[in-house]
Amino acid sequence: MIFDEAAISAFLITFKLAAVTTAVLLVLGTPLAWWLARTGWRFKFIPEAVVAMPLVLPPTVLGFYLLIALGPNGPIGFLFESAGLASPAFTFTGLVIGSVIYSLPFVVQPLQGAFEAIGSRPLEVAATLGASPADRFFSVAVPIAWPGFLTAAVLGFAHTIGEFGVVLMIGGNIPGSTRVVSIAIYDHVESLEYAQAHWLAGSLMVISFIILTVVYGLNRRFRPIRLK
Amino acid sequence: MIEASFNIAKGDFVLETDVRIPSKGVTALFGPSGSGKTTFLRTVAGLERHDGCFLKFWDEEWQDDGVFVPPHKRRIGYVFQEPSLFPHLTVEKNIAYGIKRRGLRLVDQTVRKSAKSLGIDHLLDRSPSELSGGEMQRVAIARAVGANPRVLLMDEPLSSLDEGRKREILPYLDNLHRDLEIPVIYVSHSTDEVARLADRLIVLAEGRVECEGPISEVLTDLAHPLAHREDAEAIIETAVESYDEDYGLNLLKFSGGEFIVPGAPIEVGRRVRLRLAARDVSLTLEKQKDTSILNIFSAVVTEIAPSGTSQVTVRLDAGGTPVLSRVTNRSAEVLGLKPGKEVYAQAKSVAVIR
């Protein structure tokens, strides 16, 4: 057996975290991106800047503030405790919250770009043909922006797999609960267990390569959709 | 009946209209670019919302202070300048899109019927990217008309096409014009399209209605610049009476007499619209006998106005049909032209437009 139980659990947690984060981001990021793409609000650059913050901030800064926010005295931790739940710091839920914020721009920006590229014309046409705003969104905007959704999902997923600093700060390193592959590799290197580090790092490279190849291959097939 | 009282201010641009559009027939909104035609049409559709607008469709208020019916609830058809087909749907699904949303039954039959009326029924399985520009615009028209709108709005639907493609589509527009039982508002800056398609004309200039009325009246109204243009013309509605096989001539009747038009035979009884340019109409006091000109009819001078320094435009009444004639000041004086004078109008050439 190449991977011991701890390694397999680290992989499972990593992919579960990436999948849940991507799903949450698509649900939250789509309306946000739609609003940013369509609003005429003159101060929309402020939310745009906020969305882009994780791109420039060191993950430790983000992680530090998240740690405080998630703790029992922080606003998010307080919300959880008021609802009768345990503080999400050092739990999988905490990791999801951190990852959602950390990967936000990687999902929102491609979606916003895809929505902006549609322009208002196809939506106006749909309106004159009797489609309500929600109907226009699902029957026109989503299918035309489909490659944007694919890119957003892949980037969000891949970026979450590659997460390290934020997880280290807010997840602790609890095997079977919050220990992801990137942290397991770090631990192995610290303990000079290069063989195990190699196997984990190499696997992550191969898996990432396969995912991206499949997705870019699919995206090519969608590309013939052009606006005329 | 559509009532549109707009008082729109968009930055420096102001659009002021107070027009009524009848329940049937094509009303052309004519004017140079920047005159407010598209703003008018988009406001009627509800695609733009401005303060100071009152819009009523029959007894439904579409817009007023505090009232705004969104476009998807107005049951309009809108044809944009560019075809704007949905790129992710086939031709068939593009046409079906509106039909389904209006809750119409027999979607497939309706799609086929509208596709057929625009000659695109062989393209139903294609994707929009496989169509020519003319075909795309025909799909866009079929999509708008198929959904059974209560008013059809067309914003320069031919302007993005070259001459060949325009000629390809115009016959279909003629058919629509004949068959549709709903009002059509057709925005254009082309006199050719307007003369061919419109029943009524609203002339816009710099955001104001310059004149409006039946097209034959507006084109020949000497108070307005259209009648003084070099290519000023009158529109004459006729019906085919008979065909002279020996000489290959169509005989067309109109309120003031008849026209003889060479060419292939036109079905007897069909309504034909002619355009008669003011510069092709000369006037005589006696009916000429020894002349090669075939089309001579009597008319009464109703109005005379100068066009430039040495010419006048004469408005004539030929049994109720207004006709224009452009003559020199000298001829006008020699013939003693004045309102009420009876003359003979000789038409050097006349064109069948549909």
Image (cartoon, coloured by chain):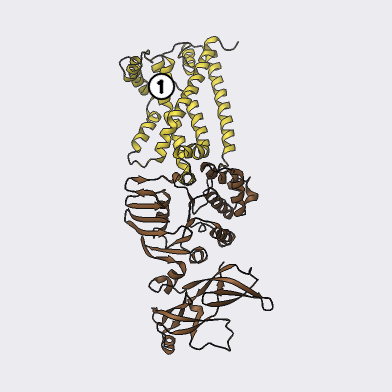
Left or right: residue B208 compared with residue B163: left
Residue denoted by label 1? A97
Residue B294 visible in image: yes
Q: Chain B takes which shade in the image?
A: brown
Residue B206 visible in image: no
Q: Residue at x 40, y 18 (%)?
A: A94
Which chain is in yellow here? A
Which chain hosts label 1?
Answer: A
**Number of marks in the image?**
1
Q: A5 or B7: nearer the eye?
A: B7
Q: Position of residue B48 (x, y in %)?
A: 39, 49
* Vertical position of residue B345 compared to residue B41: above or below: below
* Vertical position of residue B109 compared to residue B18: above or below: above
Three-letter amino acid code at the position of disc 1: Ile
Q: Quadrant of residue A3?
A: top right
Secondary structure, mark 1, is helix
User: The N terminus of chain A is located in which quarter?
Assistant: top right
Q: Position of residue B112 (x, y in %)?
A: 62, 48
Q: Position of residue A149 (x, y in %)?
A: 50, 33
Q: B169 or A114: nearer the eye?
A: B169
Q: Position of residue B76 (x, y in %)?
A: 47, 49
Q: Residues within 10 Å of mark 1 (few under 14, many from 20)?
A: some
Q: Residue at x 55, y 71 (%)?
A: B238
Q: Residue furthest front?
A: B59
Q: A113 or A30: nearer the eye?
A: A30
* Vertical position of residue B218 compared to residue A142: above or below: below
* Vertical position of residue B275 compared to residue B299: above or below: above
Q: Residue furthest right?
A: B246
Q: B184 or A31: nearer the eye?
A: B184
